[in-house]
Amino acid sequence: MLKEKVKELLEQGLEEDPSLFLIDFTMGADNSIHVVIDGDHGVTVSDCIKISRAIEHNLDREEHDFSLEVASAGASAPLIMPRQYLKNVGRKLEVVTKEQKVEGNLTAVNENSIVLEWKAREPKPIGKGKVTVQKREELNFSDIIKAKVVLKF
């Protein structure tokens, strides 16, 4: 019963800001509530507070003892939902599929796939030496096992 109420409050909180979306929602046997959100334009601390309040202020602590944590998907967290790829267009991704591991710039996202582009050094077709070539790969979401943003420091 509490889980359904929390889910309903969470959905209402997210409806108030359409740029935010749910990545993960879990609730332990001890009523520990863990929510992970992301946003089309990132997530601020005030976004987490807003979602936390949407849940916490509508539950009666006298009726239910619970703990609540609302967090943003971390910078190093894998991309899970297609919607997360959209905000990362132009960034470098590392993508693992069943057949390969590809690292390249995310240049496009559509309904079923993403496009990665990168430069590679390959042997010249004729003669000695190498030449830089532009590579492009379209990867279906269904083939992606894991994808994450490559952070530069």
Image (cartoon, rainbow, N blue to C red):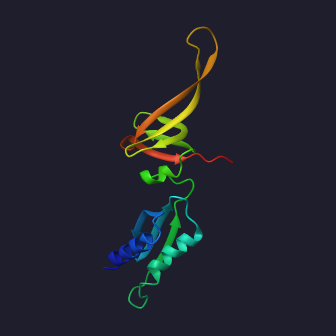
Q: Position of residue 42 (x, y in %)?
A: 55, 60
Q: Quadrant of the N terminus?
A: bottom left
Residue at x 55%, y 64% (from the top left corner):
43
Left or right: 126 in relation to 60: right
Residue at x 57%, y 44% (from the top left corner):
90
Residue 28 seen: no
Above or below: residue 56 compared with residue 150: below
Q: Position of residue 115 (x, y in %)?
A: 47, 38
Left or right: 21 in relation to 134: left
Q: Position of residue 141 (x, y in %)?
A: 39, 44
Nearer-the-camera pick, 17 or 116: 17
Q: Residue furthest left?
A: 1
Above or below: residue 35 compared with residue 145: below
Q: Residue furthest right?
A: 153
Above or below: residue 104 compared with residue 63: above
Q: Within the image, what quadrant is residue 128 found in? A: top right
Residue 48 seen: yes
Please give the count of numbered marks on the rendered protein: 0
Q: Residue furthest bottom?
A: 62
Residue at x 47%, y 69% (from the top left corner):
17
Q: Position of residue 116 (x, y in %)?
A: 50, 37
Above or below: residue 24 compared with residue 33: above
Residue at x 49%, y 76% (from the top left corner):
52
